[in-house]
Amino acid sequence: MVEKTAIDWIALVLVIVGGLNWGLVGLFGFDLVAAIFGEMSTISRAVYSLVGLAALYTIYFATKK
């Protein structure tokens, strides 16, 4: 079993947050990130970018031994 580092846990949390946000968008048309930080503000764009990078990292993590 591969030991998880702090980066692994941060990426996992970001992917979960992103998944929950997309669930809210799909089910209720409510974008929590936009509601908190503003629609396409610099901060919300940074959050979306971090979630995307976390997803890419999680793909890598899921495939390593």
Image: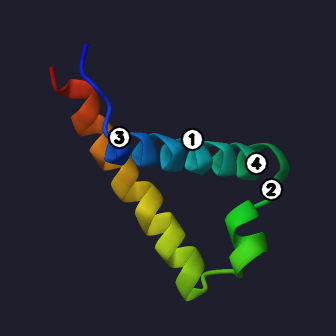
Check residue 24 in the rendering and tell me which mark sits there, or answer none: 4
N-terminal-most mark, 2 or 3: 3
Under circle 3, the secondary element is helix
Mark whose residue sits in front, 4 or 1: 1
Amino acid type of the residue tagged 1 in the rendering: Ile
Local secondary structure at mark 1: helix
Identify the residue shown where x is 64% and y is 49%: 22
Kindly report which numbered mark, 2 or 4, lies closer to the viewer in this rendering.
4
Q: Amino acid at mark 3?
A: Asp
Q: Amino acid at mark 4?
A: Leu
Of residue 25 and residue 18, the one placed in the foreground of this image is 18
| Residue furthest to the top | 1
Which one is earlier in the sequence, the residue at label 2 or at label 4?
4
**Residue 27, located in which quarter of the rendered image?**
top right
Q: Give amino acid for label 2.
A: Gly
> For the view shown, which residue lies furthest in the bottom direction?
42
Q: Left or right: 34 with respect to 52?
A: right
Report x, y in % for residue 15. 49, 45
Horizontal relation, residue 48 to residue 22: left or right: left
Q: Is residue 40 above or below residue 7?
A: below
Identify the residue position indicated by label 2 in the image. Answer: 29
Q: CA distance from mark 4 to mark 1?
A: 12 Å
Residue at x 71%, y 72% (from the top left corner): 34
Tell me which label, 4 or 3, sits earlier in the chain: 3
Callout 1 touching callout 2 (CB < 8 Å): no
Report x, y in % for residue 54: 38, 51
Residue where numbered disc 1 is placed: 16
